[in-house]
């Protein structure tokens, strides 16, 4: 969202291709390899992404950023899982680690300032009320002046509370919606390797079996045909 919260702006976080570009980058793969304790180049050719279509996409709606699965393959399950987690955390930082992080920092400073101002305003209201109660001999004009000051302080108090509430809502939005996050950590699972070479070998094996069956059945079939012809 833009700083006023009125519309979406186009940044890395709104581009579905950002995660793919990050995890396929040789630089970030090297960083992930170091964090996982893998040899240099271990992730080359072993990283891919899968976009998870949401309900909006199924209904033909646009504007919904898809979830992205980061898939890492290899022979060392524990290290491969750590590498996948590393790539996920790197992607989160690269996608929303600049604009959204800065926005969160700014909102936290505003909320802290609101709290400080609210405490000061509350103390001023208490002091004014105590002054009225401790001085029973105040004139009507003096009481009116105190009442006016208390009223102005209460209005300021309400405004500060409104500002603080709005900033807290914007902070929650930034942290839970605008900021990218890793939903599930990586876990190593066994998968069956599938490749064009394997498919060709399986196809050739099936063709060979069918060829053997055809050769075995051909002679009996030919005999039946010859007997029928006689």
Image: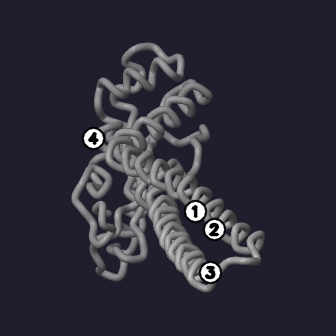
Which residue is denoted by mark 4 in the rendering? 21
First reached walking from the N terminus: tag 4 or tag 2: 4
* Residues at marks 4 and 2, CA–CA distance in whole angstroms: 56 Å
Nearer the observer, 77 or 147: 147
Residue at coordinates 59% horizontally, 30% vertically from top-left? 77
Mark 3 sits on what residue? 143
Q: How many marks?
A: 4
Residue 101 on image: x %, y %: 40, 45
Q: Nearer the viewer, mark 4 or mark 2?
A: 2
Residue sitting farthest toward the left: 10
What secondary structure is marked by label 4?
helix
> Helix, strand or loop at disc 2?
helix
Q: Residues within 10 Å of mark 2 (few under 14, many from 20)?
A: some
Q: Name the N-terminal-most of marks 3 and 2.
A: 2
From the image, state whether disc 3 or disc 2 is nearer to you.
3
Whether tag 4 and tag 2 are in contact, CB under 8 A, the answer is: no
Q: Nearer the viewer, mark 1 or mark 4?
A: 1
- Quarter of the image holding residue 226? bottom left
Q: Secondary structure at mark 3?
A: helix
Alpha carbons under labels 4 and 3: distance apart: 69 Å
Q: Which mark is residue 121?
A: 1
**Where is mark 2, residue-wise?**
125
Q: Are marks 3 and 2 in contact (CB under 8 Å)?
A: no
Tell me which numbered mark, 1 or 4, is placed earlier along the sequence. Answer: 4
Mark 4 Cα within 10 Å, few/some/many (few <14, many 20+)? Answer: few
Q: Which residue is drawn at the image coordinates 59% and 56% (left, top)?
A: 120
- Locate residue 140, reporting x and y percent: 61, 85
Mark 1 Cα within 10 Å, few/some/many (few <14, many 20+)?
A: many
């Amino acid at each position: 969202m833009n700083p006023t919260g009125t519309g979406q702006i186009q940044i890395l976080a709104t581009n579905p291709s950002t995660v793919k570009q990050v995890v396929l980058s040789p630089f970030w793969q090297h960083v992930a390899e170091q964090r996982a304790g893998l040899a240099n180049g271990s992730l080359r050719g072993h990283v891919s992404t899968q976009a998870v279509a949401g309900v909006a996409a199924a209904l033909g709606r646009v504007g919904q950023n898809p979830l992205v699965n980061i898939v890492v393959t290899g022979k060392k399950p524990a290290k491969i899982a750590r590498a996948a987690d590393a790539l996920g955390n790197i992607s989160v930082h690269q996608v929303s680690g600049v604009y959204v992080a800065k926005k969160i920092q700014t909102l936290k400073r505003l909320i802290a300032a609101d709290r400080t101002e609210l405490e000061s305003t509350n103390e001023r209201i208490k002091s004014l009320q105590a002054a009225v109660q401790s001085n029973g001999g105040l004139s009507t004009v003096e009481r009116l002046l105190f009442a006016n000051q208390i009223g102005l302080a209460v209005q300021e108090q309400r405004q500060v509370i409104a500002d603080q509430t709005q900033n807290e809502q914007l902070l929650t939005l930034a942290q839970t919606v605008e900021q990218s996050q890793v939903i599930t950590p990586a876990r190593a699972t066994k998968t069956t390797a599938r490749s064009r070479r394997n498919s060709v070998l399986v196809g050739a094996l099936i063709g060979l079996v069918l060829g053997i069956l055809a050769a075995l059945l051909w002679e009996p079939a030919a005999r039946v045909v010859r007997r029928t012809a006689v």
